[in-house]
Image (cartoon, rainbow, N blue to C red):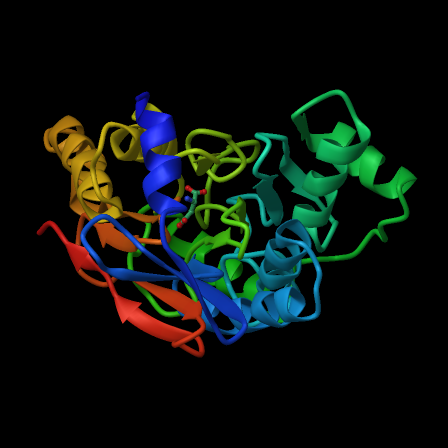
Amino acid sequence: MSRRKFIKNTVLGSIATSGFGITVKNPKNKELAVPRIISTWKHGVEANKISWQKLKNGEGGLTAVEYGVRDSENNPDERSVGYGGLPDREGKVTLDACIMNSNNDCGSVSFLENIKNPISVARLVMEKTPHVMISGKGAYDFAIKNGFKRENLLTEQSKKDWEDWLKKSEHKPVINIENHDTISMLLIDSDRNLFGACTTSGAAWKMHGRVGDSPIIGAGLFLDNDVGAAAATGLGEAVIRTAGSAMVVECMRNGMSPLDACKEVVHRISKLHRNRPEWEYLQVGFIALSKSGDYAGYSLKKGFNFALTDDQNDSILIDAKYRI
Ligand code: ASP
């Protein structure tokens, strides 16, 4: 029997109903609830609740992940996503986002300015164009043509923080601070289909034009509906160098649990960066969700957390395990 068929058969082997979701026993007899949603950082708690409600209302997984992460994009107090995100070194807020469904359809925007909800533009790229990724002015024009409003995304607070930063102009990311980092969300629905979304204003004080891992399918986000899904947060350059999320999914395909898969890729990143100057401030974290409903979060350094929502957990925050 092929490995894919084996996974499908064992996963679908014993299904029992439990409230809104269904519960499946994996080969180790562990009860795995679906639907299930995980997302990065504390802002994931609220985002998950919105997504969960969307599912309960009968909306699809794609709409659920889109509207969950939009909550962070819209929140001016989230300083690393959408409106209120910290700007680049020229004081411009530039956004990256991508979205993916269970058919491997995906859409992405990068280096997008003045549009509050890049995740919804990414979804339109997926649904209305023959392309996967649109960038910069092209992405902005596409958004405006499709009814998005031009908005100033630099809040007074972000402007002030940028002016303070200008005094020293030191490019040195600060890791694990509250209100920090990308929101990446992974969702498995009750039909066991996977969905993912990822959106960010990227690294604070980046060079103008810099694009991180978050809008890159395979780096910031990847899923294979036969296997599982993964998403990243942290220093985008390190995640791109290692095709991080795609590798986590590949490790799961080769039989690893979500936790072992995340550990393996963090280990590779660690090995590759130990002698690089960014090692001092390097942080990367992954979340992963398997087809069986198993999940994990794991980071290089202490401080990463992720939100979990399912039939038994009403959006809880979990401290991820870490390497060092
Ligand atoms: N991964 C994002 C980037 O490098 C930022 C983050 O998650 O902190 O743009």
| Spot occupied by residue 185 in the image (x, y as percentages of width and height) | 48, 54
| Spot occupied by residue 89 in the image (x, y as percentages of width and height) | 51, 44
256 on left or right of 47:
left
Q: Residue at x 41, y 46 (%)?
A: 12
Number of on-image labels? 0
Is 144 above or below relative to 56?
above
Who is closer to the viewer here, 255 or 218?
255
167 on left or right of 120:
left
Who is closer to the viewer here, 130 or 165?
130
Q: Residue at x 49, y 64 (%)?
A: 161
| Spot occupied by residue 115 in the image (x, y as percentages of width and height) | 74, 50
Q: Residue at x 83, y 51 (%)?
A: 150
Quarter of image, res 64 = bottom right
The reply to whether residue 234 is in sight is: no
- Location of the N terminus (image quadrant): top left
103 on left or right of 234:
right
Who is closer to the viewer here, 168 or 89?
89
* View quadrant of ligand 1: top left
Is 94 above or below relative to 77?
above
| Spot occupied by residue 157 in the image (x, y as percentages of width and height) | 57, 70
The reply to whether residue 121 is in sight is: yes
Quarter of image, res 66 = bottom right
